[in-house]
Image: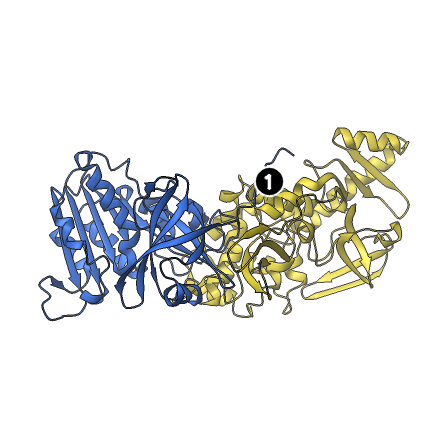
Amino acid sequence: MLLGYALVDNTVEFSETKSLTDLPLRVSDIQGPGYYELREGFRFRHGFSSPKWYLLPPEHRLLVVTPSYEASDALNSSERRAVLFGAKPCDLRAITVLDKILLGKHPIYTLKRRSVVGIIVEECLEPGNTCFCAVVGSGPTATSNFDLAYARLDENTVLFKPLSKLGYELVEALSLREAAREHVEAYYSAVERATSTMLKRAPSLREVVRALEKSINSEELWRSLSEECTGCGNCNYVCPTCFCTEIVDRVEETRSTRVALWAGCLTYTYGLVAGGHFRRELYTRYRHFILHKFLFYPRQAEGLLGCVGCGRCITWCPLGLDLREALSRVVREVE
Amino acid sequence: MGVVYENSFKFERSLVVGVAREARGVNTYTIRLSGEYKASPGQFNMLYVYGLGEVPVSISSLPVHRGAYTLVDHTVRVVGAVTRAILLRLGVGSVIGVRGPYGRGWPLQEAWGRDVVIIAGGIGLAPLRPVIKFIEANREKYGRVNVLYGAKSPEHLLYKYELEEYTLIPNTRLLLSSDTPSENWRHHVGFVTDLVEYIDVDTKSAVALICGPEAMMRIAIKKLLEAGFAGENTYVSLERRMRCGVGVCGTCQLGHYFVCRDGPVFRYSDVEEYFWIEGV
């Protein structure tokens, strides 16, 4: 099965690609804070969904239980083999992050991830307006953990970069020509341009991390930063590394199914327990979202940041709150 | 990818073989698990009630091996849907789902040869009861022991049927408190943390194990540090919203820790950076 960004009813979803005409080859996404539009073009970056939709689906069944407490596995332990096609460097980094936290530990993630036998990455030579992968070091090019990468120099010129044995085999099977020097030069200058464009959009990672470390106790700052947040959790759901889940029972006549659902740390129930609440105030949950991405993930995922700079949380925020502005303010206002 | 598949959410169908009433809305259930089930004091199980869901509950006894089975106690207080169902519907012979044990327990090895102070508030004695039992069974390995235990009222104290027996353990002192005065109550009236000043152990090297409401644990920590205890020798057991028990559902995070996997027992000096911040 081929998994990737596919056109479905005029939107692009990360899903099974049934036909090559589903590929978003002739669209460009226009993204801004709280804004998304598809237009004609050839620079597609990403949509609201990411490989997470496949690897850790929004809703997944864990167990089926009978009223006499016989529990049976509700997982499909023979997932179809899948190749990820056209995933972006930010998506790729997100998978590496999720691997560190969930692989071998979360049954669904482990099964799905194990079914992925190949990863083909599309690099981005022109960042979208909400992109900042270069700031967090996850793009615009892919450097590891993939089989084959490609970049579209223009509408008709594609440059391939094999990494693994499978990647080299693919390049050979496609009888590709070695890239011309001018194309390689055009590629490197486009990468450089994309990188410098993005680096201007947020403070440096070092400044961000240092400021966030100092900010933990600044209740006033976090209250102020989260003033316009509604706690809807959309940022969590579109984030390719957010992995929190809630488990509920769905009861039917003769059985109850234990179903895992995505949970967002911005929503009110995050931290709620019977008889109390560990994160009752919205500012504490907003602070957790950001501190988790920049300070806590590195301590959970062997040094990797939880933010991959895809900008989805900015684009899909109903109020258009911009994470990059929040980071700039933290850098400016902490001491 | 060479990763072994295992559905960590699968529970074991288990039987309730004993129920003891502790206080209003609090019972201790003895549950029979198959095989030689091993758990360390301070670890917890996820208990499942059909159609409602799971709750994390501390193991409040040392596991007792009986032939092909192991018996463990769980002290449950009514707080939400699942615990309400347990208290209202479960009795001897009832079935319940159990998976575990999870988390890291109390540092009983590190405490060898040293004095031990146990401070518990309300239902916080549940995960510490197996510590007391363990010390009793291995008495020569530990120094002087102080148990400080308090509750809202004398009626709210757990394990009333055996509490006084703790004073029979050699070189052990039991100090009790009740937040409110009550007839025939001959112990301290006030907070359990008031009792810290009566501690008679070597504070420089003693190990302190604390469990109770977070507000109580904060006061206990402050007083212990003032009394000369080291942050590295002081431990707390924390609670959070927990759904998986193995560090994958993400809902129990405290800073960068997953309380279910990295805790619930933490060395105070390891969580100090988060301990005093609201909602981190």
Q: Colour of chain B?
A: blue
Is residue B266 found left or right of A205 in the rendered image?
left
Q: Position of residue B218 (x, y in %)?
A: 28, 57
Q: Residues within 10 Å of mark 1 (few under 14, many from 20)?
A: some
Position of the N terminus of chain A, as image quadrant, is top right
Q: For this rendering, which residue is in front, A45 or B88?
A: B88
Res A181 visible:
yes
Q: Which residue is mark 1?
A: B5
Coloring scheme of the render? by chain
Q: Which chain is yellow?
A: A
Nearest the eye: A320 or B115: B115
Q: The residue marked by circle 1 belongs to what chain?
A: B
Q: Amino acid at mark 1?
A: Tyr
Identified at 80% across, 29% down, the residue is A168
Q: Would you identify the image quadrant in which residue A246 lies? A: bottom right
Q: Is residue B258 visible?
A: no
Q: Secondary structure at mark 1?
A: loop
In the displayed structure image, the side of residue A98 where residue B116 appears, left or right:
left
Query: Which percent across, then down, holds residue A132?
Result: 66, 51
The image position of residue A108, as x and y in percent, is 62, 48
Q: Is residue A264 above or below residue B135?
A: below
State the image coordinates of residue A188 (x, y, percent, origin top left): 77, 38
Residue B79 in which image quadrant = bottom left
Q: A229 left or right of A144?
A: left
Q: The C terminus of chain A appears in which quarter of the rendering? A: bottom left
